[in-house]
Amino acid sequence: MKANLTYEKVKINKLIFNKNLEHSIDFSYQLPDYYTGIFKVLQFELEPHISSCRTLNNQFIVDGNAKVKLLYIDEEEGDIKALHQNIPFSKTVELDEDISNAILFYDVKTTYKNCKIISPKKIDIKANLLIPVKVQLQKEENVLKSAAEEDLQLKLSPIKITSDQIWSTQQFDINEQIELSEICKEILDVRVKIADDEFKVIQNKIIAKSVAHIEILYCGETKNTPILEKSSVSINNIIDLQKINENFLYNVKYDVNSITFEISQDGKILNVKADVLIDSFASLSEQINVVTDAFSTKFEINFKEKQFNSTSYVSTINEEIEIEENLKNINISKLFDIDANITEINHMQKKNKIDFKAKLDLNILAANKDDTLESLFKSIPIEFEIKNDNVIYDYTKININNLTILKINFELKDNGSIKLKIKFNIKGFIYTSGNLKTLKNITIDETKIKEPTKAALTLYYPKTGEKIWDIAKNFKTSPLAIAEANNIKDETIANESMLIIPII
């Protein structure tokens, strides 16, 4: 007969899609007539950003743009010039089920880029983008909680599940007027980086305070002598996240999708507009007990197991890291700008910390000993660590979903070396993920009755590490009866000793 069982519906996170999407860029650009021709390329950069990631029925759509920056020496006057261009891209994936309420985790990086000068007025740009996407859907599962039969012994095991999760994206603009110290003749680059300052959770909202660091690289009236100026602006945002409260874990990341700028006629005021995407995720976890094993003290039983995959978030990562490096044997006379990117990030979990290894890619704009402008590329290995008491080796997993360089300070020393100090923010999650096991149903075979023991008293000498449950199952008695008869509070035998096995 089937046992009289009680089930409960619980929410679990199911990862239904986890792939790296690829997208190729093949773009030809003809310089407008008012642009001077290209004589020599100094720097070429292509930086992809996601502008939106959304779901529609059984589809998810990723939209973004690749920001192209080209610094070059023009063929007419030999002046340094800049070309800025946005290349839009989009990727759509269809799945086998409705994902309208799914949570999306995504990123984008460049795996290959190349700029070819076809003529002084025409360039060809080719690049490959890698877009890692995870689609996580919250579903309900029936889990076994209890049974009505007194002779049926159930093993309850704790599991951690995500009882609720919220995800949202929203956009905002940064508009800033910046007074330059010199009259601007040519804007070479404008960079906007956003650093967290303070987050406060109130019912259904996150109050976010942050700082936008703005860097402007331009040429003044002195020919081919770039000037780097920095400015900061405070930002306040109210992020709507329905149901969020202080018990939720949450992570907020910013991505600057596009930057437009315009210089005033007198060359003194720069108007900067940045389009920013805020991606917010919140999770509420709880621990529940589910039945993972069973036996009867009277009859033989049969049961079927069920497994389901679930992800549960343990904590978030949001750390500011500062590193210092010295670049030696740099044969330059002047240093104008250093732009940086951190790539090839690898991590290793250790007790209470995460060790990181990565590469620091540097684009250096400088003048050589002959005062000729040149661009240098350097890639150096870096290491850093994050301490976190929630890291458990071989149990928790790490997902880094955002790394933003916030500030770069550099100094050219008399010995020709460059002293470099970089501050960056790293964000992500510590989580558990895997197959969880519970019993699906239990059938009692009343034709196979347990033979009663003839012993008046049963003694057993367990080994250290044995489980009370396994001992009770072997003797077909109650784990609770063994614990009470021997005054044991732990589930595991700590020391070898004699146990009295009560017969029920």
Image (cartoon, helix red, strand yellow):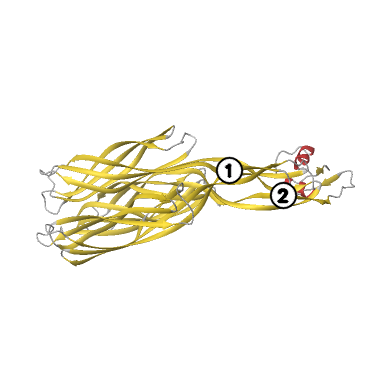
Taking the image as drawn, is residue 345 in sight? no
Residue farthest toward the top in the current orientation of the protein? 202
Q: What residue type is labelled 1?
A: Val
In this view, 20 is above or below 193: below
Element under label 2?
Answer: strand
Q: In which quarter of the image is the C terminus?
A: top right
User: N-terminal of the two: label 2 or label 1?
Assistant: 1
Question: Percent x, y for residue 464?
Answer: 72, 48
x, y percent for residue 319: 41, 43
Which residue sits furthest bottom?
118
In this image, 398 relative to 257: left or right? right
**Visible residue check, residue 261:** yes
Q: In this view, does 305 lie to the left or right of 209?
A: right
Residue 419: mark in rendering: none
- Residue 274: % across, % down: 26, 45
Q: Is the residue under label 1 in contact with that under label 2 (CB below 8 Å)?
A: no
Residue placed most toward the observer, 379 or 156 = 156
Secondary structure under tag 1 reads strand
Which residue position is annotated with label 1?
10
Above or below — where is 248 with respect to 450?
above
Looking at the rendered structure, the number of numbered marks drawn on it comes to: 2
Residue for badge 2: 442
Residue drawn at (69%, 41%) of the image: 146
**Mark 2 Cα-neighbour bin, 10 Å: few <14, some 14–19, many ≥20:** many
Circle 1 Cα neighbour tier, 10 Å, few/some/many (<14 / 14–19 / ≥20): some
Residue 424 location in percent, x, y? 35, 46
The kind of residue on which mark 2 rests is: Ile
Tell me the residue at 67%/49% (across/down).
439
Distance from the alpha carbon under mark 2 to that under mark 1: 20 Å
